[in-house]
Image: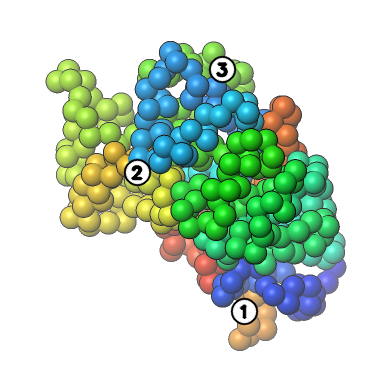
Amino acid sequence: MLSPTDSISHIRAAFPEQGFFAEKEWVLSPEAFGLDGRTVELIRALGPALRAFQRACNALYFDERHAWVAKLIDQGKPERVVRLGKLERWRNDLPRVLRPDLVLTESGVTISELDSLPGGIGLTAWLNETYAALGQSVIGGATGMLDGFAAAFPSEDMLISRESGDYTPEMQWLAEKLGRRVLRPWEVQPYELSGAAIYRFLELFDLENVENADAMLRMAENGELSFTPPLKAFLEEKLWLALFWSPSLEDYWSESLLTSHLSLLKQCIPFGWVVDPAPLPPFAVFPKLDIQSWDEMKTFGGKKRELVLKISGFSERGWGSRGVFIGHDLSQEQWGAAIDEALASFPTNPFVLQEFHRARVVMHPAWDEEKQATRAMQSRVRLCPYYFGAAEVDEPVLGGVLATVCPADKKILHGMRDAMMLPCIAR
């Protein structure tokens, strides 16, 4: 077993010259993040449950018995994007990689987001490889992320937009490991992609800013080019996590999901609501909130305001913890303004409201550069498991788990200069 100093030296020596995130750093640690057996078992079970949930979401979008769902999901999206999502050619296609963002709580985990176009794949693959070389038994093993990606995407090259450019170094590292190409829309002529299979690392809300997008989309529609994830903006919405709790869809979820999957998702998806400004009938209230209008929520204080407002997805603010408002972290005036923004945004960019689940405080050794020694850092943790598999696979493979270990005083858990980015091991 290496000393902490030797472990940090090994990690630094293994770090790629180009880094992994443009102009970003994180705190190092000699130890991977340990998860108890119960949490590891839960994370493994979540893969098949989330795949089944996403398949049910896809079917629900096309279900004419619940036509209001597609209408809600599509509002504010350009006609071209809506039409692409409904194309028969990829009607049943699903993303081949799933990454939920899990907050580690006292009782387990809670899902804050379900991402089918996630960053961090190359970073987590490198972390697994690097910490495995230290003799640490990382979840997925030294090559789990690489093997999972290669199996799910056997021939795909990677197309990365300017908007996603911060992730180019890690995807370049991944591509070199797998013998793939990293393509940039402004450097490639569409005709050169004829017959190609492409992993699209670009957001559909950003199509107007993607060079040669129109030509590439026409080729995809004509079957001359294949994209994965499929061109389905409707599957990239946080609205689904709120719709999971819709009383009018309770029977649909019960019919579409195995009892075990439904139970696990109820355990892990925080209760949520779509922030729709339409008035309720005078005899109705919002479930669990016991209010008739969103204006009443502006007066909430104390624990009643342990709620999170989030923009749903088809927006540049829909990722990276932007467009997120934590109720109890705001003044009453700020909370009221956030509610007003969500209501006004509904026609173009709907918001969801979710119950806030407080992250568990844990201790983990962080490397102190000044003292050249480790220190125990009081932390809260976001876990990002990566599941890989083709759409027809019921049990996607868990390639690895990335832990973002943040200082305990941070309310929103994401990569930052003061956080540790670590692979996970089973304790």
Residue at 18% from the left image edge and 33% from the top image edge: 293
Question: Above or below — where is 69 with respect to 314?
Answer: above
The residue under label 2 is 349
Say left or right for 191 vs 282: right
Question: Above or below — where is 2 with respect to 272?
Answer: below
Q: What crowding class fits label 2: few (fewer than 14 Cα within 10 Å), some (14-19), or many (20 or more)?
A: many
Q: Alpha carbon of mark 2 to alpha carbon of mark 1: how far?
A: 43 Å
Say left or right for 160 vs 254: right
- Which percent across, then down, holds residue 344? 23, 44
In the picture, the quarter occupied by the N terminus is: bottom right
Q: What crowding class fits label 3: few (fewer than 14 Cα within 10 Å), some (14-19), or many (20 or more)?
A: some
Assess whether mark 2 and mark 3 are in contact (beta carbons under 8 angstroms).
no
Task: Examine the rendering and report whether any part of residue 28 can be seen.
Answer: yes
Front residue (pair 79, 219): 219
Say left or right for 391 vs 237: right
Q: Amino acid at mark 3?
A: Ser
Q: Alpha carbon of mark 3 to alpha carbon of mark 2: how far?
A: 28 Å
The residue under label 3 is 256
Question: Above or below — where is 264 with respect to 320?
Answer: above
2 or 1: mark nearer the eye:
2
Q: Amino acid at mark 1?
A: Asp
Residue at 79% from the left image edge and 73% from the top image edge: 14
The residue under label 1 is 368
